[in-house]
């Protein structure tokens, strides 16, 4: 009996969806920073996943401007910022990571119930998804780093 094993070489530089939902926004913040907005379903797909193998740089809860923010940094000093924007239920994400934690991409780091929105800002990357496309957290490749 054989089991599936991901090929780390052919997927190097891939950026995975951090949550399951529908793409509701794709924006260029600056020359080298892109932002992807994903609205999660109201009653399904609560998991939050690491989009890349990275170290958790910072976790800020309940900021008045953006809610909860997580900053990730990979071994090549590339950063991804995740912004968790509350739905009308005003629920915060339940995270099981702290600053300094290391994690492999596609690993579950918490959950976010009841239809919230997650914005992901990525440096030096090409986004591979389109508006209104459905993505699965930890499974769908949403972008690739340009230099990989």
Image: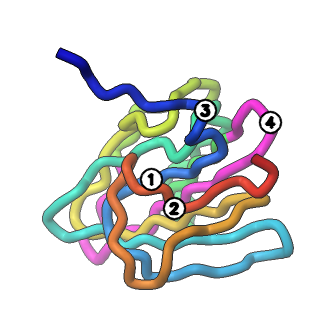
Q: Residue furthest front?
A: 1
Question: Could you tell me what secondary structure mostly forms the magenta stretch?
Answer: loop
Residue 76's tag is: 4
> Mark 3 to mark 1: distance in Å?
21 Å
Label 2, label 3: how far apart the Cα atoms are: 17 Å
Assess whether mark 2 and mark 4 are in contact (beta carbons under 8 angstroms): no
Specify the label residue 142 is tagged with: 2
Q: Residues within 10 Å of mark 4 (few under 14, many from 20)?
A: few
Dot 2, crowdedness within 10 Å: few (<14), some or many (≥20)? many
Q: Is 75 inside the magenta-drawn segment?
A: yes
Q: Which mark is residue 9?
A: 3
**Secondary structure of residue under mark 1:** loop
Instruction: Work out whether residue 36 or residue 133 is closer to the camera in this orientation and state it.
Output: 133
| Magenta-tinted stretch | 73-93
Quickly name the residue at label 1.
18
Which image quarter: residue 133? bottom left
Could you tell whether 119 is left or right of 115 in the image?
Answer: right
Q: Which mark lies nearer to you, 4 or 3?
A: 3
């Amino acid at each position: 009996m054989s089991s599936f094993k991901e090929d780390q070489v052919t997927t190097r530089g891939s950026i995975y969806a951090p949550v399951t939902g529908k793409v509701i926004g794709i924006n260029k913040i600056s020359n080298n920073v892109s932002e992807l907005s994903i609205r999660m379903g109201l009653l399904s797909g609560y998991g939050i996943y690491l989009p890349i193998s990275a170290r958790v740089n910072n976790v800020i809860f309940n900021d008045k401007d953006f809610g909860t923010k997580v900053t990730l940094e990979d071994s090549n000093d590339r950063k991804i910022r995740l912004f968790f924007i509350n739905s009308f239920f005003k629920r915060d994400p339940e995270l099981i990571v702290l600053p300094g934690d290391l994690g492999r991409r596609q690993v579950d780091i918490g959950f976010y119930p009841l239809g919230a929105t997650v914005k992901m800002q990525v440096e030096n990357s090409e986004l591979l998804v389109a508006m209104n496309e459905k993505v699965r957290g930890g499974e769908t490749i949403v972008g690739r780093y340009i230099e990989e």
